[in-house]
Image (cartoon, grey):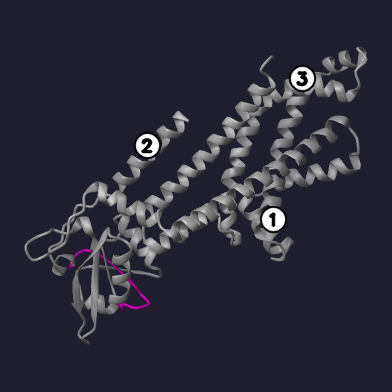
Amino acid sequence: MRRFIQLSSILIILIFLGGCTSNALYDDVSDISEKNIGILHSNVEKDVMNVLFPHASVMEYDKVISLFLDMESNRCDVAVMTQEIADMVVKRNQDYVLLGSVATPDGEDFFVVVPRENIAVGEDISIKEISFFEKIKGSLSRNLFNEKAMHLIWGGFKTTVIIFFFGAILAIILGAFLAYLSISHKCLWLYKPLSWFVMTIHDIPSVVLMMFFFYVVFAGAMNGIFVSIIALGIYASGALYKVFKIHITQVGKGQLEAGRMLGLSSYKCYRYIILPQAVKTMLPLVGGELKLLLRATSYAGYIAQKDLVKAVDAIRGFTYDAFVPLLLVSLLYLLLSWLIVKSLDYISKKVFNND
């Protein structure tokens, strides 16, 4: 838990420091004449901007969120857009304000949106200054503590947990079954093609595998959550199969033979002699594979599933703010990873308490 808190603190500091790196100050619209100006090509013509600001670098964007992400990273300095979009942006995100408007030769007005911190507040500009803590409060409020954002986050979190939980169960069952067939040398007609299939699947990137299962194997006829569970379960079972097999065989046949000489059945030899020793050494590796499976759930958005990453994209598209949503999803993945490790530690202590 201490490590989780430390990583969370570092992320918070880095993200909020990263959002305060721009130093340019603007008194009025004339100050942007030599800046990087971002426009939406769907409602502002680049040729018109080149006439109004001949010394500026005009950058075209397809989406509003792409424009403001570049403004956050300082690749773009200001945004010029129609009044309707400018008012919407300023209303949804208090980190941005209207610097003023410019009129085209045809008499059409476009409005200039800049980061609030870049305004040189003077006598002619009445813009309320916002403290650092007010910025944090406002960012948390619009990205987390509103009905739409909370609904998206909770829905994405549930989807991620469901895919991971049932995908992990499928991976463990399939991996253990393959390990059993390999060690017992039973049903070779089933073991050989199944092991070949699983190990081949494991060499394919998980995102490609999920898309292949969804769009080709099931042709969109099955719910994406079930497809994700099946694809990721098969994908992770290959690594778990190797972990199970290696750690069970490393215990040694001598202990199995000794158990049989004492009159124990094969089942009891594995249950009371082989498996307790193998499980104790394999749990850390199993935890690592489960954390990799958790990370792979972030690709569910590629098959139109509203997981945590998809929820963050939706929030960014609504608030034009990337820092807090990305911070939140990072912390949630860290929390889930921490829970995996602690759960396996608890199992280890519970099972091997008297070892």
Using residue 271 as the reference point, say whether residue 130 is left or right of it. left
- The kind of secondary structure element at disc 1 is helix
Q: Position of residue 292 (x, y in %)?
A: 59, 41
- The kind of secondary structure element at disc 3 is loop
Mark 3 is surrounded, within 10 Å at the Cα level, by few (under 14), some (14 to 19) or many (20 or more) other residues, namely some
Mark 2 is surrounded, within 10 Å at the Cα level, by few (under 14), some (14 to 19) or many (20 or more) other residues, namely few
- Residue at mark 2: 9
Which amino acid lies under the numbered mark 1 shown in the image of this protein?
Answer: Phe
- Residue at mark 3: 251
- The kind of secondary structure element at disc 2 is helix
Looking at the image, is mark 1 or mark 3 earlier in the sequence?
Answer: 1
Q: CA distance from mark 1 to mark 2?
A: 36 Å
75 or 125, nearer to the observer: 125
Looking at the image, is mark 1 or mark 2 earlier in the sequence?
Answer: 2
| 44 within the magenta span | yes
Residue drawn at (87%, 25%) of the image: 267
Which amino acid lies under the numbered mark 2 shown in the image of this protein?
Answer: Ser
Q: Position of residue 305 (x, y in %)?
A: 59, 59
Looking at the image, is mark 2 or mark 3 earlier in the sequence?
Answer: 2
Q: Which residues are magenta?
A: 33-46
Q: CA distance from mark 1 to mark 3?
A: 37 Å
Position of residue 355 relative to residue 131, above or below, is: above
